[in-house]
Image: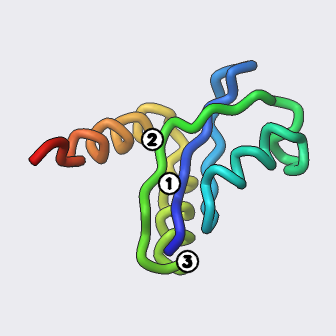
């Protein structure tokens, strides 16, 4: 099991898209400054995470999201996916 995730910088509002086996640990690494590409824009909050069956599937979703250069496309995806989550019995 793996996850594709989207973080938002609380400093400048930019997004970071990645994949990991444990989102909480990876978020801690981003906020601790361990990840060079996100260090300057800390702190980060988790905006979206999607569980995938395999690491390969998570990386493919990550690559697809990163190919969308427009912020609106990423936000539309997050809204669509979030609305598909079933809550309750």
Q: Secondary structure at mark 3?
A: helix
Q: Residue at x 14, y 43 (%)?
A: 88
**How packed is label 3: few (under 14 Cα within 10 Å), some, or many (20 or more)?**
some
Q: Secondary structure at mark 2?
A: helix
Q: CA distance from mark 3 to mark 2?
A: 21 Å
Position above or below: 82 against 23? above
Residue 65 is marked as 1
Q: Residue at x 65, y 43 (%)?
A: 16
Residue 74 is marked as 2
Query: Whole-percent x and y of residue 13?
Result: 64, 23
**How packed is label 2: few (under 14 Cα within 10 Å), some, or many (20 or more)?**
some
State the scheme by which the image is colored. rainbow
Q: Residue at x 81, y 41 (%)?
A: 38
Residue 67 found in image quarter: bottom right
Query: Whole-percent x and y of residue 19?
Result: 61, 62
Give the mark nearer the N terminus: 3 vs 1.
3
Position above or below: 72 against 36? above
CB atoms of marks 2 and 1 within 8 Å: yes
Q: Which residue is mark 3?
A: 55
């Amino acid at each position: 099991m793996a996850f594709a995730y989207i973080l938002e910088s609380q400093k400048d509002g930019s997004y970071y898209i990645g994949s990991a086996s444990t989102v909480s640990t990876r978020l801690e690494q981003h906020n601790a400054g361990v990840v060079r590409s996100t260090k300057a824009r800390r702190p980060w909050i988790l905006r979206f995470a999607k569980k995938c069956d395999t690491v390969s599937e998570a990386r493919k979703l990550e690559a697809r999201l990163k190919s969308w250069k427009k912020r609106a496309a990423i936000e539309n995806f997050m809204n669509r996916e979030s609305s598909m989550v079933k809550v309750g019995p």
